Image (tube, helix red, strand yellow):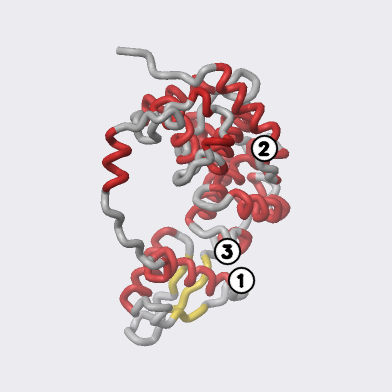
Amino acid sequence: MSAPPSIPPAARDAILAWYGEHGRSLPFRRTSDPYAVLVSEAMAQQTQAARAGDAWVGFMDRFPTPHALAAASLADVLRAWQGLGYNRRALNLQRAARQIVTVHGGEVPSDLHALQALPGVGPYTARAVAAIAFGQSAGAVDTNVRRVLGRVLAGDDAAMHAAELQRVADAAVPSGRAGDWTHAVMDLGATVCRPRRPACGGCPVRAWCAYAGGTRSAQRIARAVRPATPPVAFAATSRWLRGRIVDRLRAAPDGEWTTIHAPVGEHDEAAVRAALTALAVEGLIELDQRTTSAGRGRRARLSTT
């Protein structure tokens, strides 16, 4: 079995030098506190980094420690989460805080397995916290990192299977610079090595990059000619509907019931009832079981636990 490809040391140095000059200035990058890093990583999932940074400042003021977040009501947490979307992340973050308090004495664990055992924490988030907060040689692989490493080493962001890519990412982390390296590769993927129209002319690793050098895999060519699936309008998705329901409940005073009537946007009564039921099952909201007859709407409120 051949050894996996690796990032040349000179290329790694070039990325770090580029980051020192062009890296994004984000509020949560000014700390290595493990809890603060965990919150920032939860916020930055599927949310633009700049928006996550703005929200992170207010959230940390409101819940500065795992104990503060664990003791809060979910309703308060969801209100502080407003504008970030994917409200389940807020629920999981609070559950993680409660587990940190009850299992780890209020201290975010440094062990990768213990980190990944926290609610809502997957391999990427666990490695990001391990690298940024604890300086461990753990390669955090998100879509940006996958694209950079895949293109540089194989000419295609999908050319390496997940296990091989993880080994490459772990091996690439420079000693003593784990946090900077994590931020640097993410920023390179987000701002230069973009999914479409990458700015190869301004890339610090162009000289070492198989993609920039013209290498393309058959898999990439096949994807390029595959017909595109027509996009679904956001307002027609269950994510949009769930977000509108939670926003409406967020606006109500603590503990107060709000009646949700259908339609909501283009979603009919069946879709609204299904969304309410799913949100209740997930623990984000509570439903008043006394209002179950058709046509009367459903009374709901943010979870008070």
Residue 118: in sight, yes or no?
no
Which residue is at 54% across, 27% downward? 205
Q: What's under tag 2, amino acid-wise?
A: His
The secondary element bearing badge 3 is classed as helix
Q: Give me the C-alpha separation between circle 2 and circle 3.
A: 39 Å
In this view, the residue in front, 142 or 137, is 142
Contact (Cβ within 8 Å) of mark 3 with mark 1:
yes
Front disc: 2 or 1: 2
Image location (x, y in percent) of residue 255: 57, 72
Q: Which residue is mark 1?
A: 254
- The disc placed on residue 52 is none
The secondary element bearing badge 2 is classed as helix
Question: Measured along the vertical axis of the image, is residue 152 above or below residue 78?
Answer: above
The secondary element bearing badge 1 is classed as loop
- The disc placed on residue 22 is 2
Is the residue marked by circle 1 packed among few (<14), some (14-19), or many (20+) residues within 10 Å? some
Q: In the rendered image, which quarter contains the C terminus?
A: bottom right
Image location (x, y in percent) of residue 88: 48, 56
Q: Which residue is mark 3?
A: 75
Which residue is at 48% across, 66% downward? 243
Image location (x, y in percent) of residue 107: 63, 35
Q: Give me the C-alpha separation between circle 2 and circle 1.
A: 44 Å
